[in-house]
Image (tube, grey):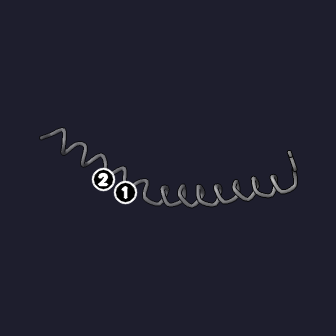
Amino acid sequence: MDQRSDETRLSVSAGSLTGRTMVRVQTFALYGSLALIAAVVFGSLSVHPF
């Protein structure tokens, strides 16, 4: 019983602390992935391997 309450308390405190941080990380990951896709597309357009 005590272990479950500790896990719940830990997850709640971690969620409240990292709520805004997770949004920033997700936003950074989204823009980073879009930039990576754009770089690969433009790179493949400028280089003709075949």
At x 66%, y 60%, the residue is: 34
Image coordinates of residue 22 in percent, x first then y, are 48, 56
**x and y, in percent, of residue 49 in the image:** 86, 45
What percent of the width, then of the height, locates residue 44? Answer: 80, 52
In-image side of 11 versus 42 (left or right): left
The answer to which image quadrant residue 24 occupies is bottom right
Residue type marked 2: Val
Tell me the SS state at disc 1: helix
Q: Residue furthest top?
A: 3
**Residue that label 1 marks:** 16
Disc 1 residue type (three-letter): Ser
Q: What residue is shown at x 22% (from left), y 42% (from top)?
A: 6
Q: Is residue 14 left or right of residue 4?
A: right
Residue farthest toward the front in the current orientation of the protein: 50
Left or right of residue 27, residue 5 in this image: left
Would you name the residue on which mark 2 appears?
12
The secondary structure type at the circle numbered 2 is helix
Residue 4: give its label. Answer: none
2 or 23: nearer the viewer: 23
Residue drawn at x 43%, y 54% is 18
